[in-house]
Image (cartoon, helix red, strand yellow):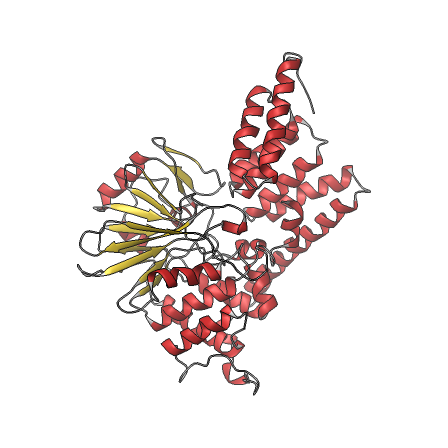
Amino acid sequence: MSEEPNVSPEVVEQAEKLKNEANDYFKKQNYNTAIEYYTKAIDLNATVAVYFSNRSAAYLKTECFGYALSDASKAIELDNTYIKGFYRRAAAHMSLGKFKEALRDFEYVTKVRPNNKDAKLKYNECNKIVKKIAFEKAIAVEHNKKSIADSINLDSMTIENDYTGPELEDGKVTLKFMKELMELYKSCGKLHRKYAFKILLDIKAYFMEQPSLVDVPIGDDDKFTVCGDIHGQYYDLMNIFEKNGLPSSTNPYLFNGDFVDRGSFSVECIFTLFGFKLLYPNNFFMSRGNHESATMNQMYGFEGEVKAKYTSRMADLFTEVYNWLPLAHCLNKRVLVMHGGLFSRDDVTLEEIRTIERNRQPPDEGPMCELLWSDPHPQEGRAPSKRGVGCQFGPDVTKRFLELNKLDYIIRSHEVKKDGYEVAHNGKCITVFSAPNYCDTMGNLGAFIVLNGKEMLPQYTTYEAVPHPDVKPMAYASSLLSMMC
């Protein structure tokens, strides 16, 4: 800890008290309040590395990776012997998929602390990830990006005599299959791998035919439901269907990204959603979120969960499928729904979104990135993203976008909200988040939005989390990330 002479002992003591209060809030998993108190401590005394490092940890918990990275770097600037600063910066780098940068931080720690076994372990784990990514890139080039889907041979997969789970009928999803599948998952059962692969192959073929922006007509007297992030919380997904009815041709849904990761029932969530998409292709819709990506899945649990419940080959196939998910939906030509938010440019049109080449991992900039990553803020204009990717946009940005594209308002997700939803930008920017008590820690409500086709006025339903089997969130996440957060 470093202190400048002009910081009085009284101020130092007061800042320490605020830091200790922040630590208490952090331990209680009240991360946003912890951030407020760390900030107050920093405002009083901005010379203490620990304050910035601790706030960085809180930002990591709230997925503000850009802010976390900045704070960790500031902590290192103040005290380059403060090892936790390097750990936190590495965690922020990894959360943004910047594994090489994370490796450099670990490498530095191992040099200054050569006898630190923990640092060596983290360095080795991160180095494995970097080498794995490099190897996969080389293989992809060598095989000219040969599709995993094309290599799947369903005929070679035998259904064992003791399998008692749901079965596809003539290779097709039926309502009977879906009801049996949901009951199977409620009792912690597993869908046979042959049917799981079949669903993935069929859904990929379907999404490949869709545009990046899907137009969704809704009849004047028809109901339409929009749900936000689910994040692997299967039993809360079932609660949505309990409250609002199962998807059907007369009860259409749009799930707005981040179906997986964090929660440890992501496999159950995604096969349920994909099943309903195949059953009701014109009445069930899914948008890509920032967690439908290889890097996020590797860090936050989905890849590990698929490998544990099925195989690494299936995990790779999921990555292919996610690349084809639509990026946005336009409801009745009046409401645009995307996972993240708006753009760093004022001239983005619906036609430009419609023609985005989306069959790839999310880029670090541009409209596709911003659709998945951006967030609203209350100030006018734009600001760098708190997440380190995308941008923050104000009410004036939203107003100009809506006027240019002749829209009423936008719906987005991507952020935990205490009440499950938030109305911002003079009613023109609505956030909906459908995972209550996110990660079993946040204490938030979940919500979904119901629209009527004629008025298109949002009606909100909120709900609390329901019990789930004793499998903790992040149970399948990267061991490296869990060691550091």
Relative horizontal placement of residue 236, taking residue 280 as reference (left or right): right
Q: Which residue of the protein is positioned furthest toward the right in this rendering?
A: 115
Taking the image as drawn, is residue 74 in sight?
Answer: no
Q: x, y (%) of residue 6?
A: 63, 11
- The quadrant where residue 237 appears: bottom left
Taking the image as drawn, is residue 425 in sight?
Answer: yes
Residue at image coords 55%, 43%: 61
Q: Which residue of the protein is positioned furthest toward the bottom in this rendering?
A: 161
Relative horizontal placement of residue 374, taking residue 52 as reference (left or right): left
Residue at image coords 73%, 39%: 109
| Whether residue 31 is situated above or below residue 411 in the rendered picture | above
| Whether residue 315 is situated above or below residue 384 in the rendered picture | below
| Nearer-the-camera pick, 208 or 438 | 438
| Whether residue 59 is situated above or below residue 243 in the rendered picture | above
| Nearer-the-camera pick, 435 or 39 | 435
Q: x, y (%) of residue 410?
A: 30, 46
Question: In which quadrant will I find the C terminus?
Answer: top right
Relative horizontal placement of residue 87, taking residue 187 as reference (left or right): right
Q: x, y (%) of residue 138?
A: 59, 61
Q: x, y (%) of residue 101?
A: 62, 43
Question: In which quadrant will I find the N terminus?
Answer: top right
Count of numbered marks: 0
Residue at image coords 48%, 62%: 234
| Nearer-the-camera pick, 302 or 202 | 302
